[in-house]
Image: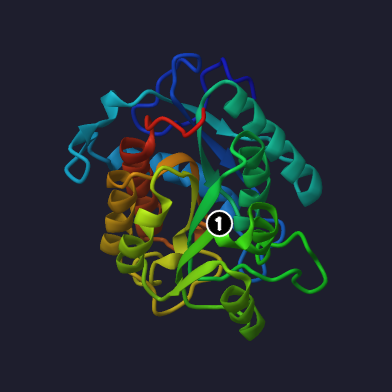
Amino acid sequence: MKFDEAYSGKVFIMSRSDYESADAVIYGMPMDFTVSFRPGSRFGPARIREASIGLEEYSPYMDRHLEEVRYFDAGDMLLPFGNPAKSLDMIEAYVDRLLADGKFPLGLGGEHLVTWPILKAMHKKYPDLALIHIDAHADLRTEYEGETLSHATPIRKACELLGPENVYSFGIRSGMREEFEYARTSGMTLEKFEVAEPLKRHLPTLAGRNVYVTIDIDVLDPAFAPGTGTAEAGGITSKELLEAIVLIARSDVRVVGADLVEVAPAYDPTEQTAIAASKFVREMLLGWVGKPASGA
């Protein structure tokens, strides 16, 4: 994929055709090679784009219009099917290039393992990086069924790269006992079940920090997002996730990149999952793009 060419497929609503003038770049990572239950999230990025056509361009949450943000939809990466290691290397190199060009990377997954190479690229540019992780699952395993490259391991890897004290997880309601014990003893922050209220407490401690945000759509209750590979009952509402995105936007945190992962359209014939995801992406664009990064 050439960055300076307009994507020939469907693009996120109001995407510009000019890469060079864009502040943010939307890119898809169609990878679901290591999922532990239901595959299909590789089709998520395309469906989120298609669902965006139903959005209003104006957000009453942010009081901003999409025409006020310059972003380019680069389409989906061409990842080698069935080869996670090479795919992860390609994602890291891709984000390296975006950061070198001064772009805000906004990734669409794909399984949650795709966040790992992004964090490696982000950490190279922002050594003080902190992570906000919004998810149903702890993702703190060192391996899953003997495989270290798994969608169950990216946040453990993030702790090892960034330091656990720089990792903040919210909405967690699923994981092994050992994962919760690791969270308790390592120094990371893990807030169970809720997102918005604990965010209010922790955002002041991240003021002025460069922060990457990763959102797994399965943080939502399956009533709001059935189209995901590993749905977990007991989740938050779409309203609460929107509130969380707005809270981050109105804080003194400097978001330097983000992703939204694990939309699997095949399990949601109503398309409410992709519709919700596209709205979250709109709010992420309007709320998080344009804040100057610390030290950048």
Side of 223 where 293 appears, left or right: right
Task: Classify the position of the N terminus by image quarter.
Answer: top right
Above or below, 204 against 29 in this view is below
Question: Tell me, what colour scheme is on the image?
Answer: rainbow
Horizontal arrangement in the rendering, residue 47 relative to residue 223 (left or right): right
The location of residue 8, given as percent across then percent down, is 52, 23
Res 170 seen here: yes
In this view of the protein, which residue sits in the foreground, 13 or 142? 142
> Is 206 left, or right, of 122 in this rendering?
left
Check the image and report above or below for 91 versus 280. above
Q: How many marks?
A: 1
Is residue 82 visible in this depiction of the protein?
Answer: no
Q: Secondary structure at mark 1?
A: helix
> What crowding class fits label 1: few (fewer than 14 Cα within 10 Å), some (14-19), or many (20 or more)?
some
Residue drawn at (31%, 36%), measured in percent from left and top? 286
The residue at the point 62 percent across, 81 percent down is 181
Pinpoint residue 228: horizontal percent, then vertical percent.
50, 63
Q: Mark 1 — residue? A: 166
Residue 235 higher or lower than 259, as above or below: below
Instruction: Determine the residue positioned at 57% across, 15% down.
Output: 4
| Residue 102 in the image, given as x and y percentages of width and height | 53, 23
Horizontal and vertical percent position of residue 165:
57, 61
Q: Between 37 and 107, which is closer to the camera in this rendering? A: 107
Look at label 1 and name its amino acid.
Answer: Asn
Looking at this view, is 40 or 24 the one in front? Answer: 24
Rendered residue at 39%/67% (across/down): 220
Q: Which residue is the extreme one toward the bottom?
A: 177
